[in-house]
Amino acid sequence: MTAGVSSARPLYTAMVTRKHPRFSVSLSSTLVHKDHFRHAGSVRNLSAKGCRVDSIISPFTGMQLTVQLHIPGESKPILIDNAAVRWSGSAGIGLEFLTIAPLHQDRLDRMIQQLQPKTGPE
């Protein structure tokens, strides 16, 4: 290659196909790991099977947490009994919901349904 001439390289972007759509939210949460820690977090996006949380902690990939999603106007949080950390870094923490009791799953489903854009005739 000649000095001052750069070779053109194609830019590749990873295409991530998701099974469940994500919705931008701003929710308080509590992340709990057994008896080891309990920390506040801010949920930034939410889907039926996971979320992205901003928090001061940096859990390792694969760590299992209990997550409480604090919904404005509701007295009790949605409880995710078991969530796995799928990634953690400067962009926050990516969690996959593994176990949710039916009552809490129903509440989460209703919330997700409310976040979905309304379609139909105007």
Image: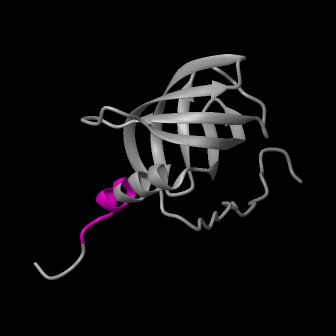
Choose between 55 and 83: the one closer to the eye.
Answer: 83
Q: Position of residue 28 (x, y in %)?
A: 41, 29
Count the marks: how many? 0
Q: Is residue 42 left or right of residue 84?
A: left
Q: Is residue 67 visible?
A: yes
Choose between 46 and 90: the one closer to the eye.
Answer: 46
Q: Which residues are magenta?
A: 111-118
Q: Is residue 106 magenta?
A: no
Tell me which residue sits at (69%, 24%) in the image: 58
In which quadrant of the rendered image does the C terminus lie? bottom left
Q: Is residue 112 left or right of residue 82?
A: left
Tell me which residue sits at (62%, 26%) in the image: 32
Tell me which residue sits at (64%, 65%) in the image: 15
Q: Is residue 77 left or right of residue 3?
A: left
Q: Is residue 88 left or right of residue 60?
A: left
Choose between 82 and 16: the one closer to the eye.
Answer: 82
Q: Position of residue 93 (x, y in %)?
A: 62, 35
In which quadrant of the rendered image does the N terminus lie? bottom right
In the image, farthest residue toward the right? 1
* Vertical relation: 90 (above or below) 52: above
* Magenta region, main secondary structure: helix
In the image, farthest residue toward the bottom? 121
Tell me which residue sits at (84%, 45%) in the image: 3
Q: Position of residue 5 (x, y in %)?
A: 78, 51
Q: Is residue 56 visible?
A: no
Q: Is residue 115 magenta?
A: yes
Q: Quadrant of residue 106?
A: bottom left
Choose between 34 and 2: the one closer to the eye.
Answer: 34
Q: How is the image coloured?
A: one colour
* Vertical relation: 30 (above or below) 22: above
